[in-house]
Image (cartoon, grey):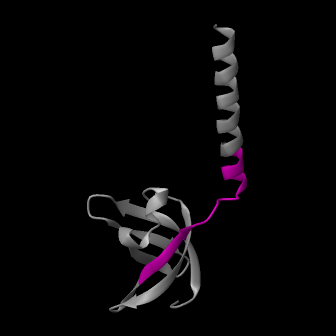
Amino acid sequence: MKDELQQGKIKQYDPEKGFGFIGTPEGDVFFHISDFPAAEGEPKRNERVKFVAVENGEKFKAVRIERVEDTSAKAKKSKVSTHNKSITSALLSNLRR
């Protein structure tokens, strides 16, 4: 598992403690918020990421974490729905004037 680019989903994140776990087919991998891209905000549950796993004692730790755009059908449907809601809101606000 080490030194290869891995993919997984954020399984859990505790903002008060600053760490969480990424779920992968091989098992959960620990991560610290300092290894997450700070400019993009805090990690969210089920968010897809790619990372490098390095040994951390007897377990692994995720480093060089990057977000991966979710291209699943569910994610696309959600984006379309959000976009449609914003269009509808804009049209309604114009009609109310």
User: At 71% from the left edge and 49% from the top edge, which residue is drawn?
Assistant: 76
Q: Residue at x 44, y 76 (%)?
A: 28
The number of callouts visible is 0
Seen in the picture, residue 95 relative to 13 is either above or below; the reply is above
Name which quarter of the figure residue 43 lies in: bottom left
**Percent position (x, y) of residue 55?**
40, 91
Question: On the image, which quarter does residue 70 sit in?
Answer: bottom right
> What stretch of residues is rendered in magenta?
61-77
The quarter of the image holding the C terminus is top right
Residue 2 belongs to magenta span: no
Query: Position of 97 compared to 37: left or right?
Result: right
Q: Would you identify the image quadrant in which residue 89 lies?
A: top right
**Toward the viewer: 39 or 9?**
39
Which residue is depicted at the point 45% across and 79% down?
A: 63
Location of residue 33 with respect to 15 vertically, above or below: below
Which residue is pictured at 41% across the width and 73% down the height?
A: 35
Q: Residue furthest front?
A: 39
Question: Which residue, as the protein is rendered here, is positioned at the far left?
Answer: 16
Q: Residue furthest top?
A: 97
Image location (x, y in percent) of residue 48 = 57, 64
Instruction: Give percent across and percent down for residue 51.
Output: 53, 77
- Looking at the image, residue 94 lies above or below residue 88: above
Towards the viewer: 39 or 83? 39
Q: Is residue 34 above or below residue 46?
A: below
